[in-house]
Image (cartoon, grey):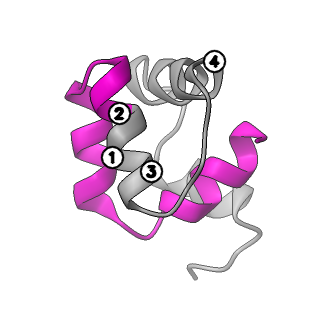
Amino acid sequence: MDLKDIITKVAGNKDLLEKLKTADISQAKDLLTKAGIKVDDSDVKKVKEALADGKLDMKEIKDIAGGLFK
């Protein structure tokens, strides 16, 4: 699954985003699976890297989501 698609799906859930930032890879994969998003380990790593290093803030997430969360 594309990073953009994953971020779009979790963008509205701030609690999930915060949990993903602090979770390890297996925990993050479980969190995403529980949220109904099927991902593999490489996708989870990309999401965690994007969230952890501050590459994505809420404005960028809104831009990725195509303005769905105006």
Q: Position of residue 63 (x, y in %)?
A: 70, 59
Marks 1 and 2, how far apart at CA: 5 Å
- Given contact means CB atoms under 8 Å apart, are the residues at marks 3 and 1 in contact? yes
Which comes sooner in the sequence, label 4 or label 1? Answer: 1
Relative image position of residue 45 (x, y in whole percent)? 53, 18
**Residue 45 colored magenta?**
no
* Residue at left offset 53%, top offset 26%: 50
Instruction: Judge by depth and name the residue closer to the eye, 10 or 57.
Output: 10
Q: Which mark is residue 28?
A: 2
Q: Residues within 10 Å of mark 3 (few under 14, many from 20)?
A: few
Q: How much space separates mark 4 and mark 3, taking CA atoms?
A: 14 Å
CA gap between label 4 and label 1 equals 15 Å
9 sits left or right of 25 in the view = right
Query: Amino acid under label 3?
Result: Thr
Residue 70 picture quarter: bottom right
Q: Label 3 belongs to which residue?
A: 33
- Seen at 53% across and 37% down, the residue is 56
Q: Quadrant of the N terminus?
A: top right
- Which one is nearer the viewer's eye here, 55 or 49? 49
Which is more N-terminal, label 4 or label 2?
A: 2
Residue 65: x, y in percent? 70, 64
- Nearest-to-viewer mark from 4 and 3: 3
Q: Which residues are magenta?
A: 1-28
- Residue behind mark 4: 42
Regarding mark 3 in the picture, which secondary structure is present there? helix
Horizontal arrangement in the rendering, residue 14 relative to residue 35 (left or right): left
Q: CA distance from mark 2 to mark 4?
A: 12 Å
